[in-house]
C-alpha cells in the first residue's frame, strides 16, 4: 500500500495516487469533505486566508462507488492561487524556508511561492488518509483522533490518554481539548498574528482499536514507519512515540508498562513494543516549527549571493501546526493500513497472541 502526491501550490491542480488498496471499499467524493475542511485554510482568522474549494475528483480505481483494487487517482484543482504574492521574493531565499535547499538541489526556482514545498501538498495526504481511515474503521474498528497540546509556550495542562477523554477538540479552531483555555489562546493568537510573528505547535495523535501484531520486528518497525511518515510532513521537526524523549528521565520500573489480566497499567510505550503493536492505543506526537514566511523583515541572500532585506507578503499561517492535526491523523492511518495489510499477507487474519492483554 503506497501513496505519492503531485502538484504545486500555484499550479493548476494537486493530486495523489494510492496503490494497493483492497477492492470493495465504498468510496464517494463526499467522503473527503470532512477531513479536508478540518485541514483547509481560511476556516478561521487564525490560518492563511487562501480559500480553496478542495473538491476531490476521483479519476481512477473506483467503479460504481467501490474501490477496484487498481491505483486510485485523486485530483483537486487549485481555485485560489495568487502567485503574484511572490513576485518580490522570486529571486530571494526566505531564511528557514525550503526555497534555499530546493535551489541548491535542482538549480531551478519555482517563483510561485512554495511550489512543491508548500503546505498545499498536505491536502492530498489528508485525502489519501480518508481512504485508509475508512478501511481501518470498517475492517478493524480503529479510531484515530489528533489534538494540539502546545502552541508556542502554552501547554495543555493535562494531556488526555484516551479519545473519549479529549473533550470538544473539534469545537475550536485550535483542536485544543481544554475549552477553558481557548479564550486565552484566541487572544494569544490574535496578538501573534498582529505582531507578524509565527509560533510552533505540538500535535498528538491517538489511534485506538489497533490489534496486537501489526508492524515488523526489525526492519519496517511500526514506530519507525510512523516516525518517518510524520517527519515527512512539512514543518515537522520532531516525532515522539509514547513517552518519547521523556523516557530518558524515567526509571525502568516506571517506563515499563506493567501487564495484568485486566490490561496494561500505563502506556509509556505508545502502543508499540519491539516494532509491533501491543493492542494498546498507538500514541504519537509531532513538533511543528514556527512558519518562516513572515512579513517581519530579515536580512537574507538572493540567488546571486547578495545580502537583501526579505519581507514575505501573501496569505500565510501564523501557526501552521494547528492545521496539522488532520494531516498527522492521515499519516498515522496510512501507516497503520499498510502495516495491517502486510501483517495479513504474512500471518493471515488470525494472530498468534495468547494470552491477549486487553488494551
Ligand atoms: C503556504 C503558503 C500559503 C498557504 C498555503 C501554505 O499559500 P500561498 O502560496 O497561496 O501564499 O495558504 O496553504 C495552502 C494553500 C493549503 O491549502 O494548505 C506555505 O508556504 O506552506
Image (cartoon, grey):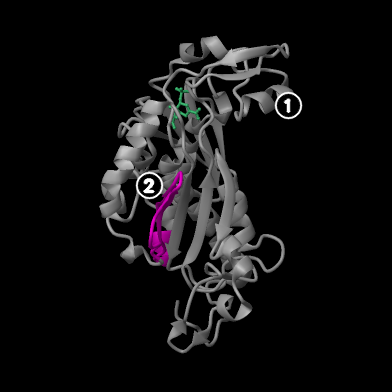
Q: Say few, some or many: other residues with alpha carbon within 10 Å of mark 2 (under 14 / 14 to 19 / 20 or more).
A: some
Residue 185 location, quadrant: top left
Q: Residue at x 60, y 18 (%)?
A: 110
Is 303 left, or right, of 85 in this rendering? right
Residue 26: tell me if it is visible: yes
Left or right: 269 as drawn, with respect to 205: right
In magenta segment, residue 345: no
Q: Quadrant of the C terminus?
A: bottom left
Q: Is mark 1 within 8 Å of ligand 1?
A: no
Residue at 37% in and 35% down: 40
In the picture provided, is 190 more to the left or to the right than 202?
Answer: left
**For residue 209, what is the image quadrant?**
bottom left
Q: Nearer the viewer, mark 1 or mark 2?
A: 1
Within 10 Å of the Cα at label 1, are there few (<14), some (14-19), or many (20+) other Cα atoms? few
Disc 2: residue Cβ within 8 A of ligand 1's nearest atom: no
Q: Label 1 belongs to which residue?
A: 105
Residue 107 is situated, as x and y percent measured from the top left of the image, at: 72, 19
> Disc 1 and disc 2: Cα gap in Å?
38 Å
How far from the left and from the top, in percent, is residue 298?
Answer: 57, 20
Per the rendered image, the range of residues in magenta is 136-160
Element class at badge 2: loop
Residue of label 2: 27
Amino acid at each position: 500500500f503506497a501513496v505519492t502526491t503531485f502538484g504545486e501550490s500555484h499550479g493548476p491542480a494537486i493530486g495523489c495516487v494510492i496503490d494497493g488498496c483492497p477492492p470493495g471499499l465504498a468510496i464517494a467524493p463526499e467522503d473527503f469533505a470532512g477531513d479536508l475542511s478540518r485541514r483547509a485554510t481560511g476556516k478561521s482568522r487564525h490560518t492563511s486566508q487562501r480559500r480553496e474549494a478542495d473538491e476531490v475528483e476521483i479519476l481512477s480505481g473506483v467503479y460504481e462507488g467501490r474501490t477496484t483494487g487498481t491505483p486510485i487517482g485523486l485530483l483537486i484543482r487549485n481555485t485560489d492561487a495568487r502567485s503574484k504574492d511572490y513576485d518580490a521574493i522570486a529571486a530571494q531565499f526566505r531564511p528557514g524556508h525550503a526555497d534555499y535547499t530546493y535551489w541548491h538541489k535542482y538549480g531551478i526556482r519555482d517563483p510561485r511561492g512554495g511550489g512543491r514545498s508548500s503546505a498545499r501538498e498536505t491536502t492530498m495526504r489528508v485525502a489519501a488518509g480518508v481512504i485508509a481511515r475508512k478501511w481501518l474503521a470498517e475492517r478493524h474498528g480503529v479510531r484515530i483522533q489528533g489534538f494540539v497540546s502546545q502552541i508556542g509556550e502554552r501547554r495543555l495542562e493535562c494531556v488526555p490518554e484516551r479519545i473519549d477523554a479529549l473533550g470538544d477538540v473539534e469545537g475550536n479552531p485550535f483542536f485544543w481539548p481544554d475549552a477553558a483555555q481557548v479564550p486565552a489562546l484566541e487572544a494569544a493568537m490574535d496578538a501573534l498574528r498582529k505582531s507578524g510573528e509565527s509560533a510552533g505547535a505540538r500535535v498528538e495523535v491517538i489511534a485506538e482499536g489497533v490489534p496486537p501484531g501489526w508492524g515488523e520486528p526489525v526492519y519496517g518497525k511500526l514506530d519507525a514507519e510512523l516516525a518517518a511518515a510524520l517527519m515527512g510532513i512539512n514543518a515537522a521537526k520532531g516525532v515522539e512515540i509514547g513517552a518519547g524523549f521523556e523516557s530518558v528521565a524515567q526509571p525502568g520500573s516506571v517506563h515499563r508498562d506493567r501487564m495484568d489480566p485486566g490490561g496494561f497499567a500505563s502506556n509509556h510505550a505508545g502502543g508499540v513494543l519491539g516494532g509491533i503493536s501491543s493492542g494498546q492505543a498507538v500514541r504519537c506526537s509531532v513538533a511543528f516549527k514556527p512558519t518562516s514566511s513572515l512579513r517581519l523583515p530579515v536580512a537574507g541572500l538572493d540567488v546571486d549571493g547578495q545580502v537583501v532585506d526579505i519581507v514575505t507578503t501573501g496569505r500565510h499561517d501564523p501557526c501552521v501546526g494547528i492545521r496539522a492535526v488532520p494531516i498527522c491523523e492521515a499519516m498515522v492511518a496510512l501507516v497503520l493500513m499498510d502495516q495491517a495489510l502486510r501483517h495479513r499477507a504474512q500471518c493471515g487474519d488470525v494472530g498468534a497472541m495468547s494470552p491477549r492483554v486487553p488494551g
